[in-house]
């Protein structure tokens, strides 16, 4: 059990402004806006039924189809732009480290939130022990719920070096990863800090690369994000697609966001921060289940920057379908939360981000998430068209929209297939390229997760529920030596 090691005196708890908290689903202004829009549509429908004046029901359906088609076009063009820009983007390269900094680097805090992670603990501790950083400048906080009767005994059975400290998370807050990270932030003694998940295998020189990256950047760069990749892409079909998606996001799309200086939705791990800036931001939102993405937006709203660095952290790709759905639904629910929180005052958001970043935020968090919900509807309409012909759906599509929709469906699907394949090529996952022809099935799973996320968001008891992702499903006998190439046939 917890061995009672002495911890540093906590600093003042970071305070997150209520306006940036996902504790409430909608602000009062959003509630009024939604009610007014619903009332206007209802009144228009009643007037049309009673008098025959005003838009007919078919008009509303056509307006919806036009809006969604426009969303698809914008999202696909945006993703194409990011992929093209990402391939030519240069991440922050650490370069030669200052000899004085090499001898006496800044104190660094590593935050590791844990919950029922006994299976992967040995590999985690081994990976952190391999970090090339002086032990006397390193503080590793293992953040554990006080009633976690699985993780605490497993930690007690391990021999931890002096820089490791087991910190039970104070009771009272939501049982989420960001709540645990805030507890760690209040105890952090480092000038810089990083988040690692239980299954992470960071490259051994990642902390030194982050230090060098911060040293070479202006003070407004308050976070650098390492690339995430999977060490087990060859486990099954699901992990191949998951690894390709991560390659697309971290090796291309996020580099494109970096190149255009747009808000970057941080990954849940391996984001390195200036601690003083992180505290000034109020830490993480304990009620947002994608606290990392939300924090990336708050950094942009402050006028600060996030940069990508040339280092990789390897994780375990989810290889079980139910486990994958739980994880993905949490991510999508968090994107919904993040968009709703930051759209409480759209005009203020526009002033703080500027037009370019504001549009990037809408495309990254708003429209991209909506498309996962409406995909099944358009698949049904496509199947209906193929089975019974165009007559049943022609009234729904004005001619120009029909042609645009067909072009979007064909061109968009081909573009996204290319994006996934490009991600595979960028990360050296060449053998996974043929699997990308089945990516539409993977998108269908995303839609299943999206509807689960929406249902949870609308239920107060599930709104902030953190669905735990099980790790250790695939044995990592190497304790973190990444699989750079597929096994031989």
Image: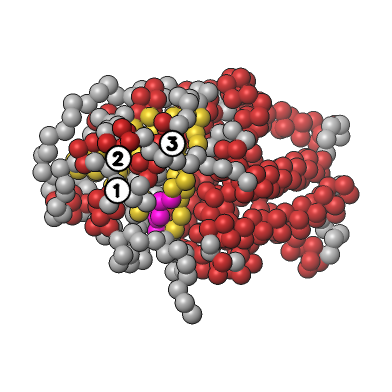
**Mark 1 residue crowding within 10 angstroms, few (<14) / some (14–19) / many (20+):** some
Describe the element under mark 2 as helix, strand or loop: strand
Which of 82 and 344 lies nearest the eye of the viewer?
A: 82
Secondary structure beneath dot 3 equals helix
Choose mark 2 or mark 1, whichever is in front. Answer: 1
Residue contact at pointers 3 and 2, CB within 8 angstroms:
no
Earlier sequence position, callout 1 versus callout 3 = 1
Q: Residue at x 35, y 64 (%)?
A: 473
Disc 1 from disc 3: Cα separation:
17 Å
Q: Are marks 2 and 1 in contact (CB under 8 Å)?
A: yes
Dot 2 alpha-carbon crowd within 10 angstroms: few under 14, some 14 to 19, many 20 or more: many
Q: Which residues are magenta?
A: 312-316
Task: Relative to 255, say whether 248 is above or below.
Answer: below
Q: Residue at x 24, y 41 (%)?
A: 134
- Is residue 313 found inside the magenta-colored segment of the image? yes
Q: Which residue is mark 2?
A: 110
Above or below: residue 303 compared with residue 207: above
| Closer to the camera in the image, 13 or 137 | 137
Q: Disc 1 marks which residue? A: 131
- Does the magenta-highlighted stretch encompass residue 224? no
């Amino acid at each position: 059990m917890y061995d009672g090691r002495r911890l540093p005196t906590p600093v003042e708890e970071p305070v997150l402004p209520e306006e940036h908290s996902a504790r409430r689903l909608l602000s009062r202004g959003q509630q009024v806006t939604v009610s007014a829009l619903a009332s206007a549509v209802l009144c228009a429908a009643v007037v049309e039924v009673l008098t025959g004046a005003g838009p007919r029901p078919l008009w509303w359906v056509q307006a919806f189809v036009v809006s969604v088609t426009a969303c698809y076009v914008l999202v696909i063009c945006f993703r194409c732009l990011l992929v093209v820009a990402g391939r030519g983007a240069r991440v922050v390269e650490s370069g030669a480290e200052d000899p004085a900094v090499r001898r006496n680097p800044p104190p660094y805090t590593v935050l590791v939130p844990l919950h029922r992670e006994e299976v992967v603990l040995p590999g985690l501790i081994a990976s952190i022990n391999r970090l090339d950083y002086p032990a006397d400048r390193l503080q590793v906080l293992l953040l554990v719920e006080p009633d976690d009767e699985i993780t605490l005994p497993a930690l007690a059975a391990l021999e931890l070096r002096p820089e490791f400290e087991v910190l039970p998370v104070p009771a009272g807050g939501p049982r989420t990863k960001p709540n645990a990270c805030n507890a760690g932030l209040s105890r952090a003694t480092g000038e810089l800090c990083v988040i690692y998940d239980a299954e992470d295998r960071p490259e051994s020189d990642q902390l030194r690369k982050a230090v060098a990256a911060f040293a070479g950047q202006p003070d407004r760069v308050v976070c650098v994000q390492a690339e995430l990749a999977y060490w087990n892409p060859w486990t099954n079909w699901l992990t191949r697609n998951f690894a390709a998606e991560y390659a697309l996001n971290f090796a291309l799309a996020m580099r494109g966001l970096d190149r255009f200086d747009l808000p970057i939705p941080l990954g849940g791990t391996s984001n390195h921060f200036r601690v003083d800036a992180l505290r000034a931001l109020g830490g993480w939102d304990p009620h947002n289940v994608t606290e990392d993405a939300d924090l990336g937006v708050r950094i942009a709203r402050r006028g600060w920057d996030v940069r990508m660095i040339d280092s990789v952290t390897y994780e375990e790709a989810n290889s079980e379908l139910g486990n994958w759905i739980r994880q993905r639904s949490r991510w999508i629910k968090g994107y919904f939360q993040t968009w709703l929180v930051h759209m409480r005052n759209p005009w203020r958001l526009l002033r703080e981000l500027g037009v370019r970043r504001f549009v990037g935020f809408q495309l990254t968090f708003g429209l991209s998430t909506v498309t996962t919900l409406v995909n099944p509807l358009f698949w049904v309409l496509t199947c209906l068209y193929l089975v019974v012909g165009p007559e049943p759906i022609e009234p729904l599509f004005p001619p120009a929209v029909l042609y645009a929709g067909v072009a979007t469906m064909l061109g968009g699907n081909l573009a996204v297939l290319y994006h996934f394949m490009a991600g595979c090529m960028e990360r050296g996952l060449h053998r996974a390229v043929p699997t990308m022809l089945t990516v539409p099935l993977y998108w269908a799973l995303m839609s299943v997760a999206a509807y689960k996320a929406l249902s949870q968001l609308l239920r107060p008891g599930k709104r902030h529920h953190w669905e735990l992702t099980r790790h250790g499903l695939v044995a990592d006998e190497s304790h973190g030596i990444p699989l750079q190439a597929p096994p031989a046939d």
